[in-house]
């Protein structure tokens, strides 16, 4: 991976972290507990609880992605960054630009 590619990837990671943090803030609002109000019906309450569960799962996934992006950002200057953790071959630059948190090449990921 060239120095220019690393620079572009670092910018991409920072953009994705910022975007993911904004999305996580929005999901936190949707994942708040459902207040037991008498004014909503039973079906509406069940729907609200279901929506809360979906938002909680999405929030967990978003936080996991943020964590992986932060690890990638911390390791980007390591000479071994961009190599597959399974086979040690270089991960395709296009894959890293699409998914900077990738630690496996396409071949190893598909196994």
Image (cartoon, rainbow, N blue to C red):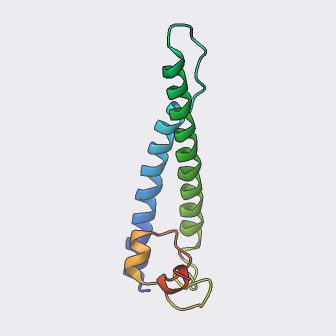
Quarter of the image where one finds residue 108 = bottom right
| Coordinates of residue 55 in the picture (x, y in percent) | 52, 39
Q: Residue shown at 39%/70% (left/top)?
A: 98
Depth check: 39 or 93 in front? Answer: 39
* Residue 2 position (above or below residue 44): below
Q: Is residue 85 above or below residue 10?
A: below
- Quarter occupied by the C terminus: bottom right
Q: Residue 84's quadrant in the figure? A: bottom right
Which quarter of the figure is the N terminus placed in? bottom left
The spot of residue 70 in percent (x, y) is 57, 61
The residue that appears at 52% across and 68% down in the rendered structure is 101
* Residue 75 at x, y percent in the picture: 58, 73
Relative to 92, is 110 on the left or the right? right
Name the outermost residue toward the front.
43
Q: Say if 2 sits above or below 71 in the image.
A: below
Residue at the image position 50 percent from the left and 38 percent from the top: 27
């Amino acid at each position: 991976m060239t120095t220019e590619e690393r620079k572009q990837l670092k910018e991409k990671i920072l953009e994705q972290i910022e975007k993911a943090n904004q999305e996580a803030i929005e999901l936190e609002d949707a994942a708040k507990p459902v207040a037991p109000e008498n004014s909503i019906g039973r079906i509406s309450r069940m729907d609200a609880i279901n929506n809360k569960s979906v938002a909680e799962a999405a929030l967990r996934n978003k936080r996991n992605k943020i964590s992986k992006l932060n690890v990638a950002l911390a390791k980007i200057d390591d000479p071994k960054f961009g190599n597959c953790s399974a086979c040690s071959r270089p991960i395709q630059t296009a894959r890293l630009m699409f998914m900077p948190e990738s630690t496996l090449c396409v071949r190893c990921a598909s196994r």
